[in-house]
Image (spheres, helix red, strand yellow):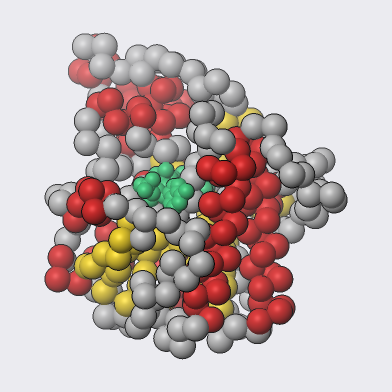
Amino acid sequence: MSASTTILVTGATGLIGFRILIAALAAGHTVRFTARSEGKAHLVTSNPAVPNFDRLSCVIIPDLTVAGAFDSALEGVTYVIHAAAPVPMPYYDPMTEIFQPMEKTTLGLLTSALKTPSVKRIVITSSVIGNLGVGPLPTIASASTRTPLPDPFPSSFGNPFEAYTLGKMVLLHIADKFTKEHNPHFAISHVVPGYVFGRNELALDANMMQTHNSSNNFLIMGILGGEPPYPVHGHYIHTDDLADVYLRVAFRDPEPGEPKDFGAAIKVDYENIFDYVERAFPKAVAEGVFKRGKVLTLAVEYKGDDVEKLLGRKPKSFEDAVLDAAD
Ligand SMILES: NC(=O)c1ccc[n+]([C@@H]2O[C@H](COP(=O)([O-])OP(=O)(O)OC[C@H]3O[C@@H](n4cnc5c(N)ncnc54)[C@H](OP(=O)(O)O)[C@@H]3O)[C@@H](O)[C@H]2O)c1
């Protein structure tokens, strides 16, 4: 990786984007991030985990869905890592708070980048469910799987999760179509994470660990005596490894025929999470801080274990991810 490249990170006020921001700064790059308000930007810049303020700047974009929203943020940027997107909350409006922001923001980012000669690659965040789709499950899905979109495409969604799944499917198709139609001067890659677990310094107290912690919420429920309302698909990636994956994908020039999209989803069973915690934090368990809960594993097949090849080392274990989140 060459040092001092400018990377634009979207979604840096969230679990994944924040970790990418820290990893990019630690690797010596100049980082610009987008935030939807000054207050949210401050949560990032005031966080003790963030190093190198002299190489960090922020652009406030209150609404990423507005046409041209990214124009000025992209000036002089070489790589874009796009991790801003809603994760499905039961109280979100499926169309206006999940599907439309995902679609419009990504299309707007690609369109702005067409006007920005410095951009070399945009890395878009997908999810394994974008490859798995909503129909019958593919025999074995991977980052390169494109499941066909429903025809006709629905004009409304039954629930937030359906909107999220279709949104992630559409993003994969949008990028492919955009490449065909515009033959852009930049490359587009997808990183496809499974459930992401690990330390999250943006969760500033015990309550936020359970409410403002994205996918970590599930783990925390399972070690605080709770149970997520539905089974969770059994693929994970540690936050630290995922940040490394994004940077490697951003800087990597695939040879012809090599994949441009990468799954980061290692198969796992959630049954043991409390055992890990019990072994590592016996005092906290004895004091009742941690209690055995239940996280059911949804069995789906997904080939997302190319991480080791991409990282050139063993990825962090699931136990590490659980203990880092718990710690
Ligand atoms: N966590 C996982 O297990 C997982 C797995 C696969 C894929 N992903 C994907 O990874 C991305 C980031 O997830 P995360 O876990 O980091 O979630 P997160 O902690 O909830 O962070 C989401 C980020 O996206 C921004 N965002 C949310 N809604 C937005 C909207 N309508 N317009 C613009 N920005 C918006 C948030 O900004 P504010 O702070 O302003 O709300 C925040 O920066 C998402 O695309 C998600 O689908 C996550």
| Along the viewing direction, whichever of 293 and 24 lies nearer the viewer | 24
Residue at (59% x, 56% y) in the render: 103
Residue 136 image-quadrant placement? top right
Q: Quadrant of the N terminus?
A: bottom left
Question: Is 309 positioned to the left or the right of 148 in the image?
Answer: left
In the rendered image, the vertical position of residue 188 relative to residue 213, given as above or below? below
Point out residue 112 in the picture as x, y percentages from the top left corner: 49, 75
Point out residue 249 in the picture as x, y percentages from the top left corner: 48, 70
Residue 164 image-quadrant placement? top right
Residue at (56% x, 86% y) in the render: 185
Residue 192 is at least partly visible in this image: no
| Along the viewing direction, whichever of 314 and 116 lies nearer the viewer | 116
Question: Is 307 positioned to the left or the right of 319 in the image?
Answer: right
Residue at (65% x, 84% y) in the render: 183
Residue at (80% x, 55% y) in the render: 148
Point out residue 2 in the picture as x, y percentages from the top left corner: 33, 82
Residue 228 is at least partly visible in this image: yes
Point out residue 282 in the picture as x, y percentages from the top left corner: 25, 19
